[in-house]
Image (spheres, rainbow, N blue to C red):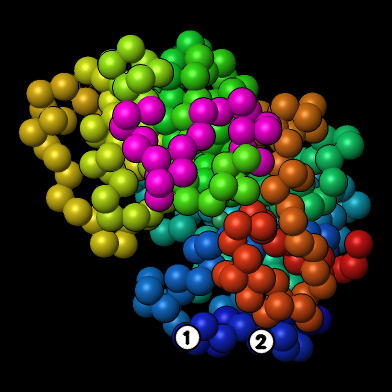
Amino acid sequence: MKAVLWTGGETFELQDVPEPIPRPGQIVVKVHASAICGTDFHYADFKSQPPIIPGHEVAGVIVDKSADVGGLTIGEAVAINPVQRCGTCYACENGIGHLCLNTRHLGGEQAPGGWAEYVTADAANAHLLPRGLSFAAAALTEPVAVCYQSFLRAQSRPGQEVLILGDGPFGFLHAVIAKLLGAKTIFVAGHYDERLRRIAEQTRAVTCNSRREDLLEIVRHRTGGLGVDLVIEATGSSDAPNLGIAALRPRGTLVIFSYIWKPCPPDFGTVSMKELNLVGSCRSRGCFDPCLAWMAEGKIPAEKLVDLRVPLAEVNLAITQLKHRKKDIFKAVLLPNGN
Ligand SMILES: [Zn+2]
Ligand SMILES: [Zn+2]
């Protein structure tokens, strides 16, 4: 079958590789849509060893399964949760299996991903698609789910003032989910007017291009000087957490969603003085099915993020476009088996 392999550095190549065979407990999925994610460009940073078939945002149709797999039928359309668990480690035994200590993450060294015509996955990680959801939208279930997880980690409530730092796909999805969960005011800060416009169109968020506007001034003005209840950090940039800390009201919560490669020391003085909550959010737990339902009902318009759909062979074109046309393209989706 055809697959795209990360072969080191920033190189991705289309190659012929053997078709996957399901191990016990596994299914084989014919991949209809597999999205490209920012983390796909960090294999070298994470010191991963090539070659790897990337792709952890995947949807398709079950075409084969191991004899021991019950409950799933060949021909069913599914989205795959990429976090495959061992079932026996501390995290798995304590209800936080999404943090499995021995995870075989789809698109990682341990488990080939979905930038391929076929992919294997643990049957336990397959989530049936509701009717009416396109494969391109369904491929985004993973990014939707991890954004919903931020609100669960924050124990957010309706009526809150929420600030989202970042106008990328994760900024978009966090804003959409904040609206769905009944946020009173949603603020979104970013660097690209066009992205902010599209986010505001979906969410009526108060947007701030922080390259030329004073975010803290805007937030204070709109919250009676108090600041927001909840900040979600979705930029990955060094100074964003401290901006979030400054924007919070007493007892507010900062969710660290992005992986921050070069963190600045947090302003722990303010954390203490305002009794702030700092929580991390990684992957998702129990979020796939509710998110799939919301997507099918149109409450999470994930498909609005998909600006580019390309066959596998054009992966490098899609990557170039993603990197150089940031303001226009939220997400690119690979269609390994055609439209
Ligand atoms: Zn991703
Ligand atoms: Zn485990």
- Relative to 79, is 245 above or below? above
- Residue at the spot x=40%, y=46% of the render? 212
- Residue at the spot x=76%, y=78% of the render? 314
Measured as percent of width and height from the top left, residue 91 is found at 37, 44
Q: 178 or 42, which is in the foreground? A: 178
The residue singled out by tag 2 in the image is 13
Q: 177 or 73, which is in the foreground? A: 177
- Relative to 197, is 224 above or below? above
Which quadrant is home to the C terminus?
bottom right
Say few, some or many: other residues with alpha carbon within 10 Å of mark 2 (under 14 / 14 to 19 / 20 or more). Answer: some
Measured as percent of width and height from the top left, residue 36 is found at 64, 63
- Residue at the spot x=44%, y=15% of the render? 160
The residue singled out by tag 1 in the image is 9
Work out how far the residue at label 1 is from the one at label 2, CA to CA, in angstroms: 12 Å
Q: Is 153 placed left or right of 317 in the picture?
A: left
Measured as percent of width and height from the top left, residue 303 is found at 76, 45
Q: Is residue 203 magenta?
A: yes
Can the viewer see residue 188?
Answer: yes
Say few, some or many: other residues with alpha carbon within 10 Å of mark 1 (under 14 / 14 to 19 / 20 or more). Answer: few
Mark 1 falls on what kind of element?
A: loop
Region in magenta: 198-218
Q: Does the residue labelled 2 lie within 8 Å of ligand 1?
A: no
